[in-house]
Image (cartoon, helix red, strand yellow):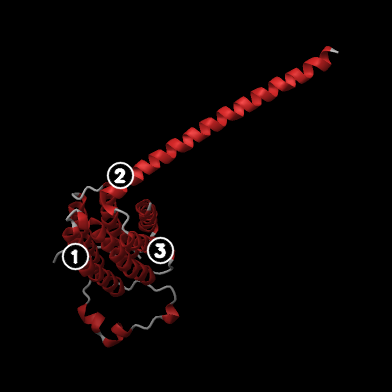
Amino acid sequence: MVIDIALGCLAVAIVLATVRIVRGPTLGDRITGFDFLGVNLAVLVVVVALRTGFTDFLDAALVLSVLGFLSTVALALYLLHGRVMK
Amino acid sequence: MTRLRTTPIRAWHGAQRTTRCLARRRGIAASVAVGWAGVALAQDVSAEEAVLRSNLGAEVLILIGSVFLLLAAIGVLRFPDFYTRLHASTKLVTLGGIGIFGGSAIAFSADGATARVLLIAVFYLVTAPLSGYMIARAGYLRGLPPAKEETSVDEWGALGAATEEFEEPVGGANDA
């Protein structure tokens, strides 16, 4: 029951973050929404692992969080310098 | 005379049909309700048997975390400004992540997966403020406007720190 409520909250949060990414007036708003979306996806995978009892999803959640952090850093560097690498 | 006799009979038949129909409908409704409850109970039992095992602390932590993530989403959507949106995202997401990862670590303790959940939680707690800091710094140095100009004081620019560290961009990253 609690897991279903959590899944609903996370689904609504992902939809709202997508709306912010589409509608964000600046690039910084879009990067913020993208960071939030990546975190929500990792948490959603953890909650799905709780729901199904299939603990191999936790590795997928770890990979998703690492990818979200690296892409956020790359996007922030692009926002700052106009390019990702020197 | 015949009308007087047939009308009560028709009424009686109608009443019989109505009660039978109602009874059938009630039976259908009752069976649907019982079947739905059975399916829900079976799903609940399978989900609870999988991990939760009616662990109250884990349930409360997961509920708190998901509610805070929902509030963070509402803040990201509704706040007027880049900086306030980033504030809502970073702070509330940290709290929600603590709640959900802590609850999952408690709930997975019987399956031996607590170490992996705690690894995700530690990685997340290290990297979330870092990414928030990088986004805020990049947005500030690019000069993204606050919602109210009269409440903003550019202390870093007054110190000269922004001008000596900031380079001219190559591409067109600023579509503000």
- Looking at the rendered structure, the secondary structure element under dot 3 is helix
What crowding class fits label 3: few (fewer than 14 Cα within 10 Å), some (14-19), or many (20 or more)? some
Residue at the image point whose x is 22% and y is 47% from the top: A54
Residue at mark 2: chain: B
For residue B71, the mark is 3
- Looking at the rendered structure, the secondary structure element under dot 2 is helix
Q: Residue furthest right?
A: B1
Give the CA separation, mark 2 to mark 1.
Answer: 31 Å
2 or 1: mark nearer the eye: 2
Q: Is residue A58 left or right of residue B16?
A: left
Give the CA separation, mark 2 to mark 3.
Answer: 30 Å
When the figure is inspected, residue B75 is found, relative to residue B151, above or below; the finding is above
Q: Residue furthest top?
A: B2
Residue holding disc 2: B46
Considering the image in quadrants, where does the C terminus of chain B appear?
A: bottom left
Q: Let me know if residue A72 appears in the view.
A: yes
Q: Is residue A44 left or right of residue B32?
A: left
Residue at the image point whose x is 43% and y is 41% from the top: B37
Q: Earlier in the sequence, mark 2 or mark 1?
A: 2
The amino acid beneath tag 2 is Ser
Same-chain status of marks 2 and 1: yes
Residue B13 location in percent, x, y? 69, 20
Residue holding disc 1: B123
Dividing the picture into quarters, in which one does residue B15 lie?
top right
Pick whichever, A16 or B151, lies toward us: A16
Q: Earlier in the sequence, mark 2 or mark 3?
A: 2
Residue at mark 3: chain: B
Pick whichever, B62 or A84, lies toward us: B62
Residue at the image point whose x is 25% and y is 80% from the top: B162
Q: Let me know if residue A81 appears in the view.
A: no
Residue at mark 1: chain: B
What crowding class fits label 2: few (fewer than 14 Cα within 10 Å), some (14-19), or many (20 or more)? some
